[in-house]
Amino acid sequence: MKKFEGFKPETIDFMWELRMNNSKEWMDQNRDRYKEVLKDPFDAFAAELAELSPMFCGEKSKYSVSRINRDIRYTKDKSPYRSNRWVVLYDEKYRGTEWKLRPCFYFELGPEGYTHGLGMWCSPPSFLTAYRKKIESNPAAFLRVAKKVEKDPLFRLGGEDYKKIKNESLDPLAQKWYKKKDIIVAADAGLEDIVFSPDLPKYLAEEWSRLKGAYDFLADIEAE
């Protein structure tokens, strides 16, 4: 695999063109181009980012890169391809798709820009129950984690909330986390110079290292 040298303007051009010409016919005509300007550079980027994972996970991570093909079986949008691409980095002890139920770091590149951070999108109820119990068991310790994220100049807490779940005995900041259904701590950016730099993996690893406290809190949760 070639060393990651930064994404190219041609990478972004390809994404825009795919969005505007989302068909098998167009992709068949541009498959070699897809491999050259998007697939191969992104795979090299993901592999290099995983090598740096001890900086933000404390140990080597596995990674999974999104497929270009969309699953269109259960959606009204029948566009066959994605015009964006992402990678998730997760604890190597998980097998198959188990990582989807656990916290992971992620980076997503689209034609308008990129987003990155820490997230959990498919948390089962058992995990979320254990998550809330852990907050309640030591509110002061959790508040230290939450305050560090709150004060961060880059990342923001997001994700869907439960409407009826709350614990008014908690600090208001802890309550923001407590009612989460999806737990996402992320940052968005446009097509900054760093996207086109070979230093992008190192930049992300350094930024994500500030989220290690939140990652450790989530990664230590054991659902019954």
Image (cartoon, grey):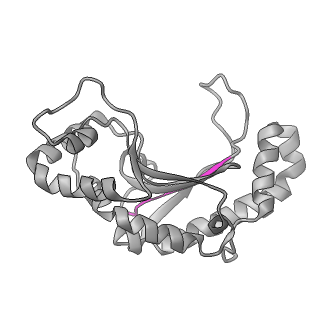
Q: Is residue 119 left or right of residue 34?
A: left
Q: Residue 182, image x and y in percent?
A: 37, 39
Q: Is residue 47 above or below residue 184?
A: below
Look at the image and give the residue range highlighted in magenta: 84-92
**Residue drawn at the location 21% of the way across and 50% of the way down:** 222
Q: Let me know if residue 87 is in the magenta part.
A: yes
Residue 178 quadrant: top left
**Residue drawn at the location 29% of the way across and 56% of the way down:** 219
Q: Considering depth in this image, is 134 or 115 the residue closer to the camera?
A: 115
Q: Is residue 115 left or right of residue 130?
A: right
Q: Let me know if residue 95 is in the magenta part.
A: no
Q: Considering depth in this image, is 31 or 157 the residue closer to the camera?
A: 157
Q: Is residue 81 above or below residue 91?
A: above
Residue 181 quadrant: top left
**Residue drawn at the location 28% of the way across and 34% of the way down:** 125
Q: Most prominent secondary structure in the magenta stretch?
A: strand
Q: Residue 118, image x and y in percent?
A: 41, 54
Q: Considering depth in this image, is 94 or 81 the residue closer to the camera?
A: 81
**Residue drawn at the location 34% of the way across and 72% of the way down:** 58
Q: Is residue 15 above or below residue 25?
A: below
Q: Is residue 198 left or right of residue 54?
A: right
Count the marks. 0
Q: Residue 13, image x and y in percent?
A: 80, 53
Quadrant holding the C terminus:
top left
Q: Considering depth in this image, is 218 or 211 the residue closer to the camera?
A: 211
Q: Is any part of residue 224 visible from this angle? A: no
Q: Residue 24, image x and y in percent?
A: 82, 38
Residue 124 quadrant: top left
Quadrant holding the N terminus:
bottom right
